[in-house]
Amino acid sequence: MSTPARTRTGTTAGPVTGTPAGPLTGTGALTRLALRRDRLTIPLWALVTGGLVASGAGSLEGVYGTAAARAEAAAAMTANSSMRALYGPVFDDSLGGLVAWRFGTFAAVLAAVASLIVVVRHTREEEETGRQEMLSAGAVGRRAPLTAALLAALVVNTAVALIVTAGLAGQGAAGALALGLALGGTGMVFAATAALAAQLTESARLAKGLTGAAVGLAFVLRAAGDSGRSPVLTWLSPIGWAENVRAFAGERWWVLLLIAAAALAQTAAAYVLAGRRDIGASFLATRPGPAEGGLATAGALAWRLQRGTLLGWSLGFLLGGLVFGGMVEGAADIVGDNAQARQIIERMGGRSALTDAFLATMVSLFGMVAALFAVGSVLRPHGEETSGRAEPLLANALGRIRWAAGHLLIAFGGSALILALSGIGLALSYGRDAGAVLGASLAQLPAVWTLAGLAVLLWGAAPRAATAAWGAAGLCLALGWIGPALDLPQAALNLSPFGHLPKLPGPDTAWTPVLALIALAAALVAAGLAGLRRRDVIG
């Protein structure tokens, strides 16, 4: 009877049959497993990201129906440094060129986020939970898990590229193909970044954080370069490379080689590192804590676990408020006399004065993004459960509700903090109506807390479905940010709790829905905690 062979690093290489397992042995099986596990999320990411761009031509044609209107809009957007920082320059005033300008940057960010989630999920997260060690007890090569994760990311980005190319082919086949390849290629660049981070770090959370920070840095560099500070900064960003493929504007095909080179270089580095470490090990070891600590309560432990994340979100929201506040004065100049463009902003921000509508749009965007923080913070104890770290705590005199309360306090209180900081940043940069702007920012909390309450309910009552809270938050973000531009019916926009909030600052004072959302959030939390008390702890 054959026995498994041990490599020099201690991982199981496979049964001794005379033919040793190669570094990629088992890649096909692991890829099929990854695609099976993500059979819902991968199509959803591809449809949302690709569909956003593919449907953009129809929505923009309704706003800028004539060549003269498109030319006027392109000139106005290019002349406004704030709009260039947000969306990039307009390289061509054709309908395809405007689609690439309006949706290209955000689609590239969505492709990057989808890629990093897929890669970390099937690499470092598998190791952290112990599943990868069990799988590697079979005939699995050392680099097979990494290869399978990258292939799963390739499926996502290929689907995005195909949807964009097919959806925009009517605007010009070359431009549609260039834009599709640019978006898919950007996703693969950050998939490779995630693969590299997964080799360097010990936790999936840190790997996602590092890659997410890389995506944020790429966006900031592109924004700084496009705003006119220095064009060189744009060329330091993979998102800037996608923009400079110049789809529908005399395509620069050679820029795609730059994107491919960045993806291949990072992938090669990740492969080298993957061959030099044990399963579960990393090259950036976590520092041990002090021998004597002050974590005397469950709340103190929750604060220790989440304080870094809260600090990062707080700084990001404050800086974001400062940046967007500087755009408010130019809102009227951006829209000009175009009634359709004015309607889009008013649908997002209310039918008040245009400046108030623009501010309402910004605070609503901050609220929708803050919901992502709240959901992630609520689901942090779920990760503690699945990793087995919660069971030893709850085996002592620590009750489940008291254990969960520390994390929920950070989720609900932290979301209030970061929204307050965004409001302070907006008010400081805008320079007037500080109280109204801060109040408008905090008015987003009932919707944020409703989504956080949904996450509590799913985690407490149906922990296997807890990650569906991310889908709910992502759907609300898509409805709020993309829905008005696509002229979705109000019934569709009302599927999001943010669709029921008053549009502030402005004369809208419909507070009944606000109270209803607060009551709904409280009911969801109570139901989730009741479910947590009754169910078994995941271990």
Image (cartoon, rainbow, N blue to C red):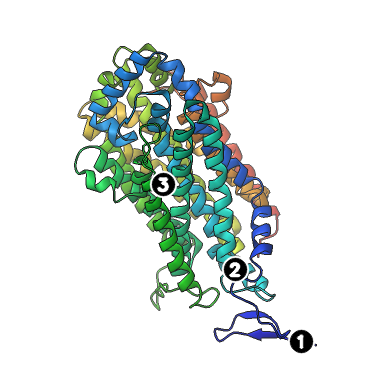
**Nearest to N terminus: mark 2 or mark 1:** 1
- Tell which of 306 and 409 is nearer to you: 306
Real-space CA distance between mark 3 and mark 1, rounded to the nearest whole angstrom = 55 Å
Left or right of 41 on screen, residue 262: left
The disc labelled 2 sits on which kind of residue?
Ala
Q: Quadrant of the C terminus?
A: bottom right
- Identify residue for label 3: 414
* Residue found at x 35% / y 52%: 312
**x, y percent for residue 489:** 55, 19
From the viewer's perspective, is residue 298 above or below residue 251? below
Q: Name, please, the residue furthest toward the right.
A: 1
**Residue 247 in sight here:** yes
For label 1, count other residues whose C-alpha is less than 10 Å away and answer few (under 14), some (14-19) or many (20+): few
Label 2 belongs to which residue? 144
Instruction: Please report contact status of discs 3 and 2: CB closer than 8 Å, yes or no.
Output: no
Helix, strand or loop for disc 2:
helix
For the residues carrying marks 3 and 1, which lies nearer the camera in this image?
1
Which residue does the numbered mark 1 point to in the structure image? 2
